[in-house]
Image (cartoon, helix red, strand yellow):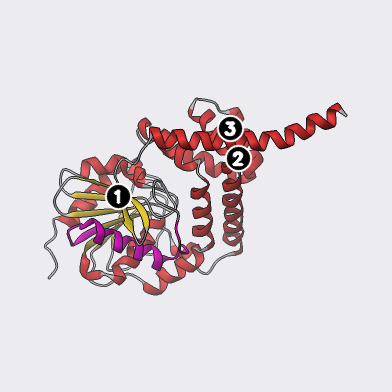
């Protein structure tokens, strides 16, 4: 009888304790780490934007789960020559959760309305990393007259996703499943606890939690953690705060579910003629490069070029800024 009562207390008490731990942690995080930029309202939803410098406009678009923090190494340097604008897409970072599916059209509409609300001077140089490359290409198709050029930083390689091979289909399905599972674990404080241990220097227990919850997907978490460590340490607690929020995982699940659809849209749209475009790729990438696109492969960088080789990205942006303005 005692054992039965003890098991009952554990089964009921642990989820409640985890839920309260998550609530307390979330409240504490928001007090400690307020948005470093400003919150702009677009159609009733708040978007976090971070602006530095003055002059011609450079807009930084992050990868599929990235935020304005992903550009920390570039933003202050670029601010010497330009007005640099980064932001958190809906459902990520300090921005509100989305109220529409995460299609390319909706992402572009959000960005366009946000730039108008922020009164950012035109024309813009748009810089898109990874999944962000799809967004800025679609923006160029919709609003070419507003652009001075594009810089694509190791963007999603459309040929890997269209047509969708069975292996990639299974990877996507697993990613969606793990994202939904991550949202559930985040609600009960498990993600927060594991990240706290990891940032505090622990390794074994966080890895064990990751393997139990994600299985083979734990290797992805370890790779992402390695990339985050390239950012200034002051950003780590803020990234932990974002990754501890169920909102981030649910948004990620939506992006992954719609990735084939969004890649198909990008392929159908193609590259906008007349918009100067520079493509930067990782050292091991083999992209299909149109004749109209300037290709600058890296000799040493991985997928996160803005962390491995920020000057390569900065020089490409400056090259577009120094071009004569199109009539």
Q: Which residue is mark 3?
A: 206
Q: Earlier in the sequence, mark 3 or mark 2?
A: 2
- Any mark on residue 165, and which? none
Q: CA distance from mark 1 to mark 3?
A: 31 Å
Residue 22, how many percent across, how many down? Answer: 55, 37
Q: Is residue 118 magenta?
A: yes
Q: Is residue 67 magenta?
A: no
- Specify the quadrant of the image occupied by residue 124: bottom left
Magenta extent? 98-125
- Any mark on residue 86, and which? 1
Q: Is residue 44 visible?
A: yes
Q: Is residue 95 left or right of residue 318?
A: right
Residue displayed at 16% across by 55% down: 321
Tag nearer the camera, 1 or 3: 1
- Specify the quadrant of the image occupied by residue 302: top left
The quadrant of the picture occupied by the N terminus is: top right
Q: Earlier in the sequence, mark 1 or mark 3?
A: 1
Q: What SS does tag 1 mark? A: strand
Tag nearer the camera, 1 or 2: 2
Q: Tally the marks.
A: 3
The crowding category of the residue bearing disc 2, from other C-alpha atoms within 10 Å (few below 14, some 14 to 19, many at least 20), is many
Tag nearer the camera, 3 or 2: 2
The crowding category of the residue bearing disc 1, from other C-alpha atoms within 10 Å (few below 14, some 14 to 19, many at least 20), is many
- Any mark on residue 188, and which? 2
């Amino acid at each position: 009888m005692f054992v039965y009562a003890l098991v009952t207390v554990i089964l009921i008490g642990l989820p409640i304790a985890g839920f309260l731990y998550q609530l307390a942690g979330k409240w504490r995080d928001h007090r400690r780490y307020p948005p470093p930029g400003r919150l702009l309202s677009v159609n009733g939803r708040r978007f976090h934007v971070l602006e530095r410098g003055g002059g011609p406009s450079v807009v930084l678009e992050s990868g599929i789960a990235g935020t304005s923090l992903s550009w920390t190494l570039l933003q202050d340097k670029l601010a010497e020559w330009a007005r640099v604008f980064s932001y958190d897409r809906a459902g990520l970072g300090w921005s509100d959760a989305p109220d529409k599916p995460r299609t390319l059209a909706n992402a572009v509409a959000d960005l366009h309305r946000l730039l108008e609300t922020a009164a950012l001077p035109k024309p813009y140089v748009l810089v898109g990393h990874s999944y962000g490359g799809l967004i800025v290409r679609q923006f160029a198709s919709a609003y070419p007259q507003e652009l001075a050029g594009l810089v694509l930083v190791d963007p999603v390689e459309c040929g890997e996703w269209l047509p969708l091979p069975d292996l990639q289909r299974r990877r996507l399905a697993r990613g969606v499943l793990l994202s939904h599972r991550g949202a559930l674990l985040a609600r009960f404080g498990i993600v927060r606890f594991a990240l706290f241990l990891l940032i505090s220097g622990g390794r074994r227990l966080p890895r064990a939690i990751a393997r139990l919850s994600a299985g083979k997907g734990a290797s992805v978490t370890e790779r992402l953690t390695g990339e985050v460590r390239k950012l200034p340490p002051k950003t780590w607690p803020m990234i932990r705060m974002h990754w501890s929020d169920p909102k981030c995982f649910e948004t990620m699940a939506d992006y992954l579910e719609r990735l084939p659809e969004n890649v198909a849209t990008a392929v159908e749209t193609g590259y906008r003629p007349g918009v100067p475009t520079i493509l930067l790729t990782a050292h091991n990438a083999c992209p299909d490069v149109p004749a109209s696109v300037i290709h600058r492969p890296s000799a040493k960088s991985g997928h996160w070029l803005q962390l491995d080789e920020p000057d390569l990205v900065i020089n490409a942006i400056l090259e577009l800024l120094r071009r004569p303005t199109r009539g």
